[in-house]
Structure formats: structure tokens, C-alpha cells
Amino acid sequence: VFGTWSAWLVRTFAPFASGSGIPEIKTILGGFVMKGYLGGRVLLIKSVALVLAIASGLSVGLEAAYIHIACCIANVVARYFSKYASSEVKKRELLSGAAAAGISVAFGAPVGGVLFSLEMLSSYFPPKTIW
């Protein structure tokens, strides 16, 4: 029952919440703008649907979901700071750090999260973002 509710929520209210989200985040970090992909609605629906899917016993890979949720949180918070809201470059730096935080939470390895973000997600990773 929970699995059905999870699928219905994602399909009805936030289709961007489906899937892992890593290819799309790589695309955003590469410079492409995807309106609504990292919004508050996606954050809310992905979080609730993830809990429902896990409660139903579905085999869900949490790593990619944590990356997507962390990037959604960073994007929503960035809207309230003019430094990040007005600059796409700064916003990409923030999203890159959020992706590293998401993978760090999933595996409990902070340095591993930074290296993952550096190697797999970002085409440009400034040294000041690493430490």
C-alpha cells in the first residue's frame, strides 16, 4: 500500500522526483538550467515518497536519493541569499558541495563524498569548495 502511495505521489505531484537524479544533477552542474527540478515541491514529494517506499519494503538505493535531496535543500536555501540567488556559478558551487554532503551522509565518509563529487559530478570544482 505504501509503495502505491509513493508512486502515486511522485507521478501526480512531482514527476521530477522520480529516478535517482544523479544524471540530471550532473547536467545542472555542467551549466544547463532545469527549471523546477530542484524545487521545494520536488524536495517535499521525494522525501515523503522515499519514506513510504522504504516503509513498504521496496529495495531503494538511498545514495542517489540523498544526493538529490541534498541538492534540493541547497537550491531552496540559496534562494534566500542574494549571493547565491543572483549568480549561477555560486549556485553550482553550492550544489556541488551539497552533492558531496549527500554522498557523505549515505556512506558516512566525508572525504569520500568530496572525492565523489569531484570525480563524478563536477566538470569544474574550485579548490575553495573542497575544504
Image (tube, helix red, strand yellow):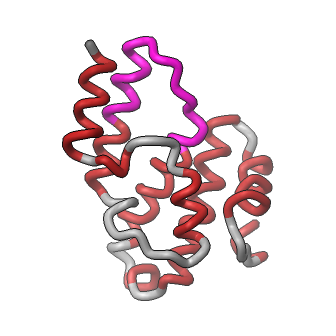
Compare residues 55 and 110 and report the one nearer the observer.
55
Compare residues 129 and 5 and report the one nearer the observer.
5
Location of the N terminus (image quadrant): top left
Residue 35 position in % (x across, y down): 34, 70
Residue at the image position 24 percent from the left and 35 percent from the top: 9
Q: Is residue 91 above or below residue 75?
A: below
Compare residues 128 and 126 and report the one nearer the observer.
126
Using residue 126 as the reference point, say whether residue 79 is left or right of it: left
Boundaries of the magenta span = 48-66
Using residue 38 as the reference point, say whether residue 45 is left or right of it: left
- Res. 31 image quadrant: bottom right
Using residue 12 as the reference point, say whether residue 118 is left or right of it: right
- Res. 92 image quadrant: bottom right
Q: Is residue 69 above or below residue 71?
A: above
Using residue 9 as the reference point, say whether residue 86 is left or right of it: right
Residue at the image position 31 percent from the left and 33 percent from the top: 48
Residue at the image position 63 percent from the left and 36 percent from the top: 106
Main SS type for the magenta part? helix
Residue 80 position in % (x across, y down): 33, 73
Residue 74 position in % (x across, y down): 46, 62
Residue at the image position 76 percent from the left and 62 percent from the top: 118
